[in-house]
Amino acid sequence: ESCSICSTDCGSCSSGGGSGGGGGGGSTTTTTTASGVERTTTKTNFYSNLQAGTRYEFTSDNDNIQISKISFTATTDSPSAQISVSTLSANPTSTEAGSTFAFLEIEQAGAASLSSITIDFFVTKAWLTQNNLDPTSVKLYRYVNNEWTALNTKQGLELEDRVVCRCPYLGIQ
C-alpha cells in the first residue's frame, strides 16, 4: 500500500510504542520495497486479542514518519494484527507524482479485518511556504490501479511549525 502527502496530482502513500488492545512495540529499519525504493524509517505497532467493534490506534511522534495517528475499528475478533508505516526515499511507482511532501508505505499483517480507518498526518509550514502552497490544498493520495487517487482530506490543527490533516482511508493491504 503506497500513499503520498501532496498538494497537487501526485504520487505514493522509528521507534516508539502504540496503543489499544495490547498494541505496542516498534522498530527502525532500512530495507527496500518490491520496486527497490529504500524505506528510510519504519514504525511497526503490534496488537493482540483484537475485539470486534473496538477502536484501536497506531500512533507516532517520530517526525521522520509524517503520520501521527491511524485509528481503526476491528470488524472481527482476531488474535493479532500488525501495522507498519514507512517513509520512502522516492516515489515507489513510475507514475508521475507532482509536488510531494513525503512518500509513505502503510502495511497490515495478521488476520484482523479493519474498518472506519482514519489517518492523521502533517505537512510542515516551511515546505508549504517553500512550494508557495496553501494548507487547504494538501491531500493524501492513495496508489490504486496504477494511478494516484486523492482522498477526502480535511485540514485540522495548525501548529507553530506544521499543519495536521485527517482523512478517511478505504483500507490497508
Image (cartoon, rainbow, N blue to C red):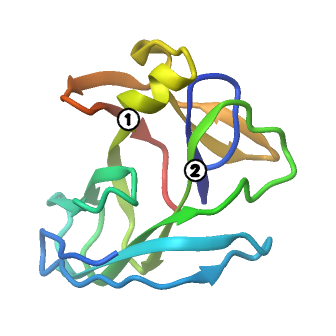
In this view, the residue in front, 26 or 151, is 26
* Residue depicted at 36% across the width and 77% down the height: 44
Q: Amino acid at mark 1?
A: Thr
In this view, the residue in front, 84 or 86, is 86
Label number found at residue 72 = none
Q: Quadrant of residue 89?
A: bottom right
Q: Are marks 2 and 1 in contact (CB under 8 Å)?
A: no
Please give the residue where the numbered disc 1 appears in the rendered image.
124
User: Residue 124: image x %, image y %?
Assistant: 38, 35
Mark 2 or 1: in front is: 1
Please give the residue where the numbered disc 2 appears in the rendered image.
13
Relative to 142, say whether 51 is above or below.
below
Relative to 83, say whether 25 is above or below.
below
In this view, the residue in front, 44 or 57, is 44
Look at the numbered disc 2 and give the secondary structure of its residue.
loop
Total tally of numbered discs in the picture = 2
Q: Residues within 10 Å of mark 2 (few under 14, many from 20)?
A: many
* Residue depicted at 29% across the width and 68% down the height: 76
100 relative position to 152: left or right? right
Q: Quadrant of residue 57?
A: bottom left
Q: Amino acid at mark 2?
A: Cys
* Residue depicted at 39% across the width and 50% down the height: 66
User: Residue 15: image x %, image y %?
Assistant: 28, 78
User: Residue 171: image x %, image y %?
Assistant: 48, 52
